Image (spheres, grey):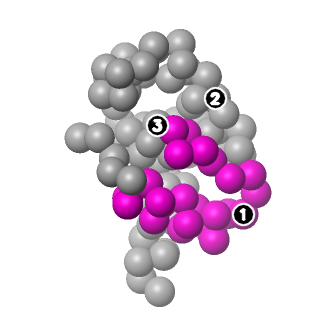
């Protein structure tokens, strides 16, 4: 499952609305969505057809921008932003 442009755009808008801060790039959002469904760095790299080191760098950037200390926090923030945004 690779995130589509529309789901990535929606997730970006909902994250920005809920948490503000630095915006994630489209690629960072794609990676964040795949982190949220518990894919490993290797699987994310395969899914997006990029190097595993690139995934590690992107995950670090996502965590920094969202103020997260780990992948679980990234997943929770995405879930909260989407759930809150869709319930409004």
Task: Determine which of the numbered discs, if any, sits on residue 31 in the image.
Answer: 3
Side of 57 relative to 37 (left or right): right
Task: Determine which of the numbered discs, if any, sits on residue 20 in the image.
Answer: 1
Structural distance between the alpha carbons of marks 2 and 1: 18 Å
Say which label, 3 or 1, has the lower sequence index: 1
Q: Quadrant of the N terminus?
A: top left
Q: Where is residue 50 in the image (x, y as percent from the top left)?
A: 42, 19
Q: What stretch is highlighted in magenta?
A: 6-28
* Residue 80 visible in the displayed image: no
Asked if the residue at tag 1 contacts the one at tag 3, i.e. Cβ–Cβ closer than 8 Å, the answer is no
List the single residue furthest toward the left.
1
Side of 27 relative to 57 (left or right): left
**Looking at the rendering, which quadrant does residue 30 occupy?**
top left
> Mark 2, residues whose alpha carbon is within 10 Å: few (<14), some, or many (≥20)?
some
Structural distance between the alpha carbons of marks 3 and 1: 19 Å
57 versus 61 height, above or below? above
How many numbered discs sit on the rendered protein? 3
Q: What residue is drawn where x is 33% and y is 51%?
A: 4
Q: Position of residue 77 (x, y in %)?
A: 54, 55
List the single residue furthest toward the bottom.
88
| Magenta stretch encompasses residue 67 | no
Residue holding disc 2? 60
> Mark 1, residues whose alpha carbon is within 10 Å: few (<14), some, or many (≥20)?
few
84 versus 5 height, above or below? below
Q: What residue is drawn where x is 62% and y is 39%?
A: 62
* Residue 61 visible in the displayed image: yes
**Looking at the rendering, which quadrant does residue 68 occupy?**
top right
Mark 3 residue element: helix
């Amino acid at each position: 499952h690779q995130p589509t442009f529309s789901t990535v755009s929606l997730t970006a808008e909902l994250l920005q609305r809920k948490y503000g801060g630095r915006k994630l790039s489209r690629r960072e959002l794609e990676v964040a969505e795949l982190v949220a469904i518990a894919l490993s760095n290797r699987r994310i790299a395969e899914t997006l057809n990029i190097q595993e080191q690139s995934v590690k760098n992107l995950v670090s950037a996502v965590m920094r921008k969202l103020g997260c200390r780990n992948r679980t926090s990234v997943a929770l923030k995405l879930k909260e932003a989407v759930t809150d945004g869709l319930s409004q």
